[in-house]
Amino acid sequence: MLHIPVTTNRESAAKFALDVVLTPQADKIQAVHDFVKSGPSFVDTEPDTLHWFGFKTADKPDGTPGVFGVFDTFPHEAGRGAHVGGALATALFANAETLLSGPPQIAPVVLLGHKATAGVGPTVGVRMTFSAKAETAEQVRALANEREAEVRNEPNVPYWYKFQKDATAFGIVALFRSEEERSSHMGSPATLRIRAKVEGWLDGPVDVSLFDVIAWKTS
């Protein structure tokens, strides 16, 4: 099993997460939307589900519908395990064959850095995933500390998470109160500098998905 040192911060004990992608059947988009919207009613009673965000990505330029996603965080692996065995996951798997075009893609990940602002309701976000070259994975990972320190000084970024899926696969999920905040963050000098810095360290392009938040819970 991959061992990744965990970065914590002052605002929460979140150390682990789930990165989930749900691809609906063509005629079940509204039903999946409604299911994701119901998520907080399941996880509100889970004390170790610290942050839970359900969202839908934007449609593709070619007209392909966006997909749904969930990103949620936990203080330890036991809490994550309890959630995976809980009521929401049970309902998801019970309805997956009817609602989804394929099995739910559920990736357990480790948080490398994060910022969470208590009591702030996000409306939009961005999810970025990318793979590092084997010889530069540690450099990509180390950027988490640098970027987290910068994000803490950006008042327009209430939620930001960098995670690692395996030895070379990484991702970032950030959530905002408005489209203006999202645009400001993505076009900021710090963001552009980091993206330019890592460009030669990656094994392919960054996959960027903008999304609208459907429902959320924070502790």
Image (tube, rainbow, N blue to C red):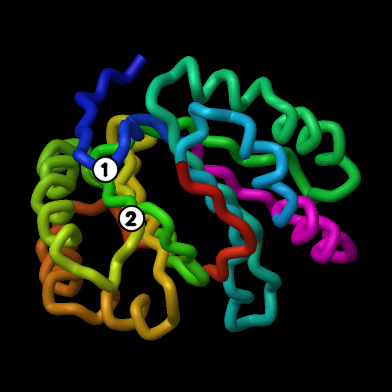
Where residue 117 is drawn, which disc sits there?
2
Between residues 51 and 212, which one lies in front from this camera angle?
A: 51
Tell me if 87 is positioned left or right of 219 in this view: right
User: Quick check: can you spot residue 116?
Assistant: yes
Front residue (pair 58, 166): 58
Apparent side of residue 79 relative to residue 111 in the rendered image (left or right): right
Query: Which quadrant holds residue 42?
Result: top right
Q: Residue at x 37, y 85 (%)?
A: 180
Query: x and y percent of residue 211 in the render?
Result: 53, 68
Point 57% across, 65% down: residue: 213
Q: Which residue is mark 1?
A: 11
User: How many numbered marks have been drawn onto this rendered protein structure?
Assistant: 2
Residue 207 shows in this picture:
no
Give how far across and how far down residue 72 sits, in percent: 50, 41
In this view of the protein, which residue sits in the foreground, 42 or 27? Answer: 42
Q: State whether residue 23 is above or below residue 153.
A: above
Residue 33 among magenta residues: yes
Hey, what amino acid is under mark 1? Glu
- The residue shown at (12%, 60%) is 150
Which quarter of the figure is the N terminus placed in?
A: top left
Q: Secondary structure at mark 2?
A: loop
Residue at position x 27%, y 47% in the image: 114
Q: Is residue 27 magenta?
A: yes
What is the three-letter code of the residue carrying label 2? Thr
Residue 77 at x, y = what percent? 44, 19
Q: The residue tagged with tag 1: helix, strand or loop? A: loop
Segment tinted magenta in the rendering: 18-36
Mark positioned earlier in the residue sequence (1 or 2):
1
Gap in angstroms between the C-alphas marked 1 and 2: 8 Å
